[in-house]
Image (cartoon, rainbow, N blue to C red):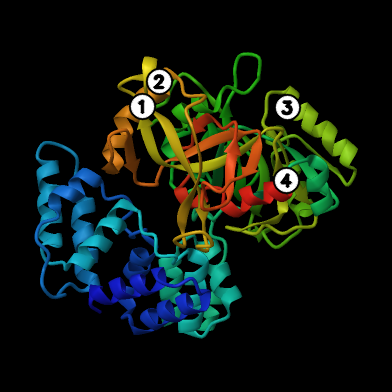
């Protein structure tokens, strides 16, 4: 298949707000792909090539974009092979020139529309509205398979491209046979947000009310003596967390998949700031700070899959195999008891609580109403859209952040894009100002005299006192007293909080 067909489909999807029209366009493309083209094409449509990060930034892309080809000649597999070559370039003397040469060779064969899509794919900035939920529906349509089967296979495999290939080329039984595999990461279950503990308990009924730790999400897999640890984004970081590996290897099981958090503690057993955890979490070599694992769920134990069993059964197994490493919590339907757990969590230096319906299964990759997080201060993960140059003491530094919330369905703009909801320069330390000033020009897309506009890839956790109605911003809502808590390098922009979540605070 010509790469231009992928380009045209992406443009069609971006130009409509109709979910049905998006599904029709994507399903039509998927049905025409050859088997070996399916996984690469899915990666192109979602802006997540199967090669992962290529190591090329905005400047590299800009330098490589010469005159465009007059007519499309690239095939899907041509582009996939070119990305293989780019990803295989090893760091070292001459690597930049080699990568630039390979990129120029690719873009020289591309039309202007193909160059634009290639740039967004390589940078991970494809905004077509082809979100994974829509694409899952399209895969089911093209393969004539139940949506539930396709969704479950994608969640348990963690690989949308492989799921599409299996659905389109395999049998229904092949698709339904996809299950948990120890050693293969699973998309994590996510939590919704509630303003109060009472509201959360009202949504869930009887629930496990657990401390919400200010740590980094981990998923630990063990088979025999082999242990692997993954991030919330399914990256393998086993070599970075020897202390976590040691704990998991010491559990009384032969095989297990555990979900939890890891964080660094001070000498009194209190949690260190999130930045300390992430500094250690992201290190390739062991550092002085030790990370402690705390688990809140178990998905598999010794040949028994637990994801479809109620949380009560999973917690019983977790208590049996890892009693010393369980996140503290209480099972209750009483809001007053749940409030006390929240006060205990805050008193211990943690963020708040997560309230989990005790009869709920583990919904991998989903954010529903079964898990609800509650923090005493509203904090939301937003995306940096631009940054203004500072004045006074901050002259010469990029300071005031423009903040955007995710608009998954395009209610206020481009589907899958971001809607500006406010600005802030509060909470920025000198270290963060220095980092911003170095980082944001590297992902710059344009600038004016006072502002650098950046690719929307940087997630930042923002604390607010609430929101207010606004005619200034397209989403109709503006942040009140926003301040920076921390950058979230462990989160992707598509994991940011939505404009709908912020608008719900108006009703609250």
State the separation of the CA atoms marked 4 and 3. 16 Å
Element class at badge 1 = helix
Asked whether the residues under the numbered discs 1 and 2 touch, taking CB atoms below 8 Å apart as contact, a structural biologist would say: yes
| Disc number for residue 81 | none
Q: Is residue 353 left or right of residue 126?
A: right
Q: Is residue 322 left or right of residue 18?
A: right
Residue at horizontal 10 percent and vertical 72 percent from the top: 70
Q: Mark 3 or mark 4, which is nearer the start of the sequence?
A: 4
Q: Mark 1 or mark 3, which is nearer the start of the sequence?
A: 3
Element class at badge 3 = helix
| Disc number for residue 194 | 4
Asked whether the residues under the numbered discs 4 and 3 touch, taking CB atoms below 8 Å apart as contact, a structural biologist would say: no
**Foreground tag (4 vs 3):** 4
Residue at horizontal 40 percent and vertical 68 percent from the top: 14
Mark 3 = which residue?
Answer: 346
Callout 4 crowding tier (Cα within 10 Å): few <14, some 14–19, many ≥20 = many
State the separation of the CA atoms marked 1 and 4. 33 Å
Above or below — where is 457 with respect to 25? above
Mark 1 = which residue?
Answer: 435
State the separation of the CA atoms marked 1 and 2. 6 Å
């Amino acid at each position: 298949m010509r790469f231009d067909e992928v380009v045209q489909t992406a443009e069609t999807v971006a130009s409509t707000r109709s979910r049905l029209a998006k599904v029709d366009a994507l399903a039509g493309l998927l049905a025409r792909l050859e088997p070996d083209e399916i996984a690469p094409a899915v990666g192109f449509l979602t802006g997540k090539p199967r090669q992962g990060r290529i190591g090329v930034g905005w400047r590299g892309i800009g330098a490589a974009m010469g005159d465009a080809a007059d007519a499309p000649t690239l095939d899907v597999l041509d582009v996939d092979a070119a990305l293989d070559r780019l990803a295989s370039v090893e760091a070292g003397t001459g690597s930049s020139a080699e990568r630039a040469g390979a990129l120029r060779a690719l873009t020289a064969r591309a039309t202007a529309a193909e160059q634009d899509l290639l740039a967004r794919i390589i940078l991970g900035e494809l905004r077509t509205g082809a979100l994974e939920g829509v694409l899952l529906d399209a895969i089911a349509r093209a393969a004539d398979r139940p949506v539930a089967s396709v969704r479950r296979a994608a969640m348990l495999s963690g690989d949308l491209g492989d799921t599409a290939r299996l659905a389109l080329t395999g049998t229904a039984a092949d698709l339904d046979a996809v299950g948990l595999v120890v050693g293969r990461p699973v998309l994590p279950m996510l939590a919704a947000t509630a303003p109060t503990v009472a509201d959360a308990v009202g949504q869930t009924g009887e629930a496990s009310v657990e401390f919400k730790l200010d740590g980094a999400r981990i998923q630990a897999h063990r088979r025999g003596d082999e242990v692997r640890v993954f991030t919330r984004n399914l990256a393998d970081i086993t070599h970075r967390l020897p202390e976590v590996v040691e704990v998991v290897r010491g559990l009384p099981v032969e095989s297990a998949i555990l979900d939890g958090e890891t964080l660094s503690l001070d000498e009194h057993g209190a949690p260190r700031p999130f930045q300390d955890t992430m500094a250690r979490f992201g290190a390739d070599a062991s550092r002085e700070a030790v990370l402690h694992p705390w688990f809140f769920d178990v998905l598999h134990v010794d040949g028994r899959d637990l994801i479809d069993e109620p949380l009560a059964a999973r917690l019983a197994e977790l208590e049996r195999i890892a009693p010393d490493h369980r996140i503290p919590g209480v099972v209750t339907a009483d809001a007053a008891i749940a409030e006390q757990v929240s006060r205990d969590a805050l008193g211990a230096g943690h963020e708040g609580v997560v309230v989990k319906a005790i009869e709920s299964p583990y919904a991998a990759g989903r954010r529903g109403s079964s898990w609800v997080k509650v923090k005493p201060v509203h904090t939301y993960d937003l995306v940096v859209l631009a940054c203004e140059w500072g004045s006074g003491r901050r002259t010469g530094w990029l300071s005031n952040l423009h903040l955007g919330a995710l608009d998954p369905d395009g209610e206020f703009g481009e589907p899958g894009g971001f809607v500006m909801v406010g600005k802030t320069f509060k909470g920025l330390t000198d270290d963060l100002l220095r980092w911003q000033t170095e980082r944001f020009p590297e992902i710059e897309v344009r600038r004016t005299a006072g502002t650098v506009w950046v690719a929307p890839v940087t997630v930042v956790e923002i604390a607010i006192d609430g929101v207010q109605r606004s005619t200034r911003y397209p989403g109709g809502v503006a942040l009140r007293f926003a301040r920076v808590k921390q950058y979230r390098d462990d989160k992707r922009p598509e994991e940011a909080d939505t404009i709908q979540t912020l608008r719900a605070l108006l009703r609250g």
